[in-house]
Amino acid sequence: MSDLLKTYQGVDSLRSLTQAELPAFCEELRLFAQVEGQGKKGHLLSSLGVAELSVALHYHFNTPQDILVWDVGHQAYFHKIITGRKEGFRQNRQKEGLSGFTNRLESIFDPFGAGHSSTAPSAIAGFWKAAQLKKEKAEFIAVIGDGAFTGGMSFEALNYLGQEQANVWIIFNDNGISIDENVGALKEFGLYQSLAESLGFQYIHLSEGNSIPALLSAFADAQEIKGPKFLHLKTSKGKGLLEASRPRAEEIAATTSFQDVVEASLMAEFNTNDKLVLLSPAMLAGAQLNSLKEVFPARVIDVGIAEQHVVTMAAAMAAAGLKPIVHIYSTFAQRAIDQIIHDVALQKLAPVFLIDRAGLVGEDGPTHHGAFDISLLSAVPNLRIAAPAGEKALREMVNWSLAQEEACFIRFPKDDIDLSKEHLWKSYRPHWWQNKKQKFIISFGSLAAQAQEAVQNSEWGHLHLPILKPFPDGDILEQLKESELIICLEENTYAGGLASNLARLKAEHNLKGQIKSICLPDYFIAHASRLEQLEELGMTANALKKYLT
């Protein structure tokens, strides 16, 4: 193997290579990414399939003057290495290291940030239109995968770009694999061409998407075409994967997670209630719910990356007499707030929403934190919001939610459950430990375990509140009347949360006690491990103890 990467500095180094040297350079990139990424969480497989594409794009185009936008960012690892971030890649997705996604604050080669799906065509439309208005010349390239073509934003942008006959490139990376199996009619052979051409794009198909000569030749030919171009590349996801980099079943955590409990709870409920239907916007695997689909294939529905669609579909299924359950990550639920308000709450329909990845998510960072669901949902009438502290409470909440006549939102983190403390979480109802009402911590959600550990052997009490909406004004008011100091602990932003409700009660009743809020701050929290993030924000037991004086 050659040693081209050893002295590599950035795109100038790449462009100094001969075309004959580029395939060897791609293999060095694959080896480097796997060696440096070993044992780290991330989306390595997606990037392995686009080594040649990443190299060819930066070799052919004059980036960063030419605008290159990657959709989602799962595929952008080699893009980062190529654009001068080789050394930083050693700390990819670690605290104070590189982001796992493209980030415009990280490099001028990342003109637009990513993390959520199906945004690249709209972003490239914006860059193209801005350049047109400013009378600037450049090439505009969006790279998007086949999984992202289940998202509606992709079609909205293509419709606009075709109408404008914009001189842009849509590079369609088709490896046939996304996090979950791709869904939808477009995945059938030939329909991508029909779609592109019907919208006014010149369609180019390249079956050798992992061939440097084929890519460079296709780019050169397409360069002569004016107007929107749709390059459909067939690539091999995970190309060159080393055995040591393969995910292994035995590496899956042996501890019980909130996701494990959800899967077991739903399996039990589905066995006894044939009106239950589970809907997911392309996250069954991440939610550990594929086993449920294997047992109940007709009643577990993956709609693709279509968050707005899944909420309205669930609302209509509820109107038709079924009991739909929508499993959705908190960060992706943000994309469907209008549907939650207009199609669910306004019509007084009662689907159940399992809000996964609520709170801090660790290495995925600010694009994926579940920070805003409480603030967005708490102002909406006709719904309930709950968060369990442990396994028993989560099981009971799932069962409880199925009997409610309002939409229920059950939020839980991407985290394990400490079964040694499970005896503390008696139910989904409010309860005290160490009933000391002058000074106490009041917690909401899974951080109850941190609060409980903090107050042990102290003069402080701990009140856990599993249901935030409707807020139990009467019960909590009695506690506030006797309090001198309350610490509110919650893994969400302040607006609409626990502390803001307590402050409202205090103001309404002219109470004297102090309220200290420990919640997610008014800034975006950088990627790090979940524990590092909790420590930074003062949400661990050790951090809480400094307030208990």
Image (tube, rainbow, N blue to C red):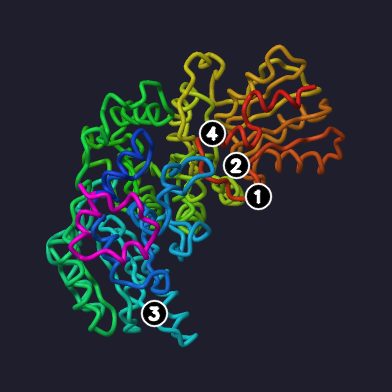
Which circle, 1 or 4, is nearer the viewer? 1
Q: Earlier in the sequence, mark 1 or mark 3?
A: 3
Magenta-drawn segment: 1-27
Query: Element under label 3?
Result: loop
Residue 474 lies, with reference to residue 301, above or below; the image says above
* Number of marks in picture: 4
Task: Identify the residue shown where x is 48% and y is 44%.
Answer: 407
Q: Which residue is mark 2?
A: 492
Query: Residue 119 or 1: which is nearer the viewer?
Result: 1
Type of amino acid at the residue the image marks with label 1: Asp
Q: Which residue is mark 4?
A: 387
* Sequence order check, earlier mark of 3 and 2: 3
Q: Which residue is mark 3?
A: 138
What's the distance in space between the residues labelled 1 and 2, CA to CA? 10 Å
The quadrant of the rendering that contains the C terminus is top right
Where's residue 176, x and y in %? 19, 53
- Type of amino acid at the residue the image marks with label 2: Asn
Q: Which secondary structure lies at badge 4?
A: loop
